[in-house]
Image (tube, rainbow, N blue to C red):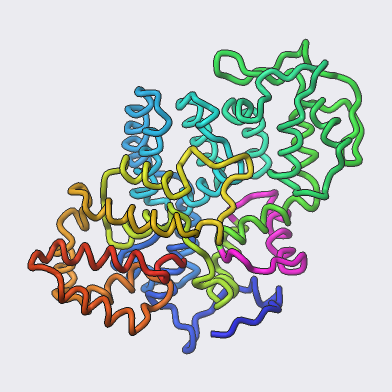
Amino acid sequence: MAVETKIDPIWAWQPFTPSDSQPWDRSLAAHLYRRAGFGADLQLLDEAVAQSPHDVVDELIALNLETSDFRAVADSLAQTLLAGGDPMKLSAAWVYRLLFTPAQLLEKTTLFWHGHFATGADKVKDSAMMWRQNQLLRRHALGDFQALAQAIAKDPAMLIYLDSTSNRKSHPNENFARELMELFCLGEGHYSETDVVELARCFTGWEIRRDRFRKNRYQHDEGEKSILGKRGAFDGEQAVEIVVGRDDMPRFICRKLARYFIADELELTDDLIEIPAATMRENNLQIAPVLKLMLSSNLFFSAHARARKIKSPVELVIGMLRGLNGTTNSQLVARGLRDIGQGLFYPPNVKGWDGGRAWINSSTVLGRANLFEKLLSDEDTKFDGRSLTQSLADHDIHDADHAIDHFEHCLMAVPINPATRRQLNVQFGSLGKDPEKNYRRLLHAVCSLPEFQLA
């Protein structure tokens, strides 16, 4: 389908209404779950289709907290892994949440903030500190951006990552001040080098003692500062408030949210992004209303957005498992994600992951296929709690052609090319007599297709 390059902002952000030419069906519901979460099995897709798209989005937004039962199990697993003190093993605790959380949008947005306020365990060696930051991001993920920015400014893992553990008035550390404006709130070109120097003075006296944030009033510069056109004897909290309160901040955040949830390479002009930005301002910088607008919009369900993202490693692996109601070895997934470029708690640098086409190169394409081979060869990998053959039989699927249909419905943003489908069928017919191995090889082949890399 040809896609117009010029997008009318009014049309873009109006609520999507299903029509005869674009009905609300499994395909659109799967698109919504791939973006607002990681994926959905057929039962969840059929439950979604029985509702309106707006009701489904409302439910995803309303699930802004984990249930107490789920949190108890997930936190217990994390505490067990924390006892080992290895951040790599801690990654498996997050994999468990990604795979089983009923609050998919909350977890998807927590992952967004992990890439936005990127902090890496390769430098912050304390796994408990990294886990507390992860909980902080989840707590604020769909809430007040001002509160999130204030909390992350005092987060010990962030301060260690940006070398700000001991900020003295005689030697203000500029790292956090610079990233607060450049990477976290405003973007390049929206501040001066003088703003960086003056902003850094506001955070003097902020330090870490016994792994906790504290203010050392003897090391705080109480003099007058000039930041982004405002003058006063500002402290750190006031400095964050000034930066977050800039009129261009919502446009910066909404652009990043739109690239993450809607499309990798959409031209997000000021005109196009102003309506979500205005929504953020009108709702006192709350994130949830912005996501509700985006996920309910004409733009989100249009050809500008569908199959217009390259799956991140997390979306690739967790999406396959959630789409087929699969479970597996969480440690294997955690190691595999790092091998193909998205180690949880291990972003590459303070800018986080670039995303989009940067996910794909000759090395990662091979790595993606190899990771699926490992997962599908692992005896812990189950579907509906049983073998893949039994799971498919429960859906009355007993041959390759219907299995390919099933995988396409549950996993693919675009149909499988007819020639490729014929080739998959031929390959399946040439395999041995073990149906479980054959169906797993078929699934591996589907997951290795170029079409499967699109969300």
Residue that extends furthest to the bottom in the rendered view of this protein? 20
**Residue 392 % position (x, y):** 18, 67
Quarter location, residue 435 = bottom left
Q: Is residue 88 magenta?
A: no
Where is 429 relative to 323, above or below? Answer: below
Q: For the image shown, how many numbered marks are present on the structure?
A: 0
Q: Is residue 84 left or right of residue 234?
A: left
Residue that extends furthest to the left in the rendered view of this protein? 433
Quarter location, residue 330 = top left
Who's the residue at 27% across and 82% down the image? Answer: 422
Residue that extends furthest to the front in the rendered view of this protein? 362
Q: Name the foreground residue: 62 vs 151.
A: 151
**Residue 269 % position (x, y):** 74, 67
Chain part drawn in magenta: 262-288
Q: Is residue 313 left or right of residue 140?
A: left
Who's the residue at 49% across and 59% down the image? Answer: 361
State whether residue 352 appears in this view: yes
Q: Is residue 276 magenta?
A: yes
Q: Is residue 119 left or right of residue 227?
A: left
Q: Name the foreground residue: 296 vs 7.
A: 7
Where is 102 relative to 46, above or below? Answer: above
Who's the residue at 57% across and 65% down the image? Answer: 262
Who's the residue at 33% across and 73% down the image? Answer: 409
**Residue 226 % position (x, y):** 90, 33
State whether residue 47 appears in this view: no
